[in-house]
Amino acid sequence: MTAASTTITATPGIMLIRVGQAGCALRWDAVHQCWRWPDPVGSQIYAWPAPPAMPSGLRMLESARVMASCRSGRLLMGLGKRLGMVELPEPGQPGRALQAQVLLTIDAAEPRTVISDGCADRDGNFVFGTANTARDQRPIGSFYQYSQRYGLRRLALPAVAAAAGIAFSPDGRTLYFADSARGVIQCCHYDAELGKAGGLKTFAQLLAPGPGTAIVDSAGALWSVQGGALVQYSRHGEVLRRIALAREPAASVAFGGAALDQLLVLGGQGGLYGLPPDLAGGLAPGLADTLFDDSGSASRGNLQA
């Protein structure tokens, strides 16, 4: 199916909740059985438990756009140019603003770049990319792998204006990513242990500019947020469907629930949506996020961008 022939499904979605001022980086936290996402405008981390109950928010001293759950129960956050670790309070503890323990600063000598997207690979390392926040939008962003065992390692991938759509195949050997300045999703071979990427090729064309987050389901299909809509690609790069929310642009997507069979879409204005049965029926379940391995500690010598 080509971009020109793709059926566009506009749906109001099933609005589940609306909180905060903005949404990004929706994740299913299997340890705590809840959906989590950061609000970079309101400097909050929101959680919505399953079975459904009232959502809760935790105020942060600085805003974040990228997040991954850790084996310890903590959260690894992308905070502007820095990676930091956040300790979640125990239930019933007094509310207080959360301050991240800073792990390292990314590309400290380049003030224009910030962490723009990222997720844990299938081996528990954190893979992320940066974006150029200046008006010139020159391709000065890079991709990295961070682990407590090896520290920070730059991946040998092309420089980008803004890294987006980072995701991994079910076996973890293929890395997908996009660049806001280009109209394609790319993929490459990925070796988590060696921290190496190679064999770069085009996976698929973007249907709209503005790539966002991406995930891969258990059948190997890639779900990509782009241009405020959700696009599903087959494992071979063919467009299967495009879904646009009627109320607000899509910002992120994730599978969750006990069986990982619930596909939720987070809107850019803080709305969380489920898909109606005619769209959700027959979808392959998702894949559990691998928890970031924070059991070890990287040497100070490895914490250099």
Image: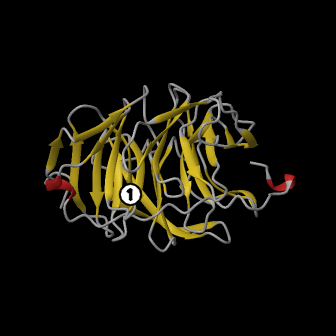
Is residue 188 positioned above or below 84 on the image? below
Location of residue 238 in the rendering, given as x and y in whole percent from the top left corner? 26, 64
- The residue closer to the viewer here, 101 or 211, is 101
**For this view, does 182 lie left or right of residue 119?**
left
Which residue bears the numbered disc 1? 257
Q: Which amino acid does label 1 sit on?
A: Gly
- The residue closer to the viewer here, 140 or 192, is 192
Residue at 13% over, 52% down: 7
Residue at 81% over, 56% down: 302
- How many marks can you see? 1
Residue at 64% over, 59% down: 71
Location of residue 63 in the rendering, given as x and y in whole percent from the top left corner? 59, 30
Location of residue 79 in the rendering, given as x and y in whole percent from the top left corner? 63, 36
Is residue 110 positioned above or below 215 on the image? above
Disc 1 crowd, CA 10 A, few/some/many (<14, 14-19, 20+): many
Location of residue 141 in the rendering, given as x and y in whole percent from the top left corner? 58, 44
- The residue closer to the viewer here, 159 or 262, is 262
**For this view, does 208 lie left or right of residue 150?**
left
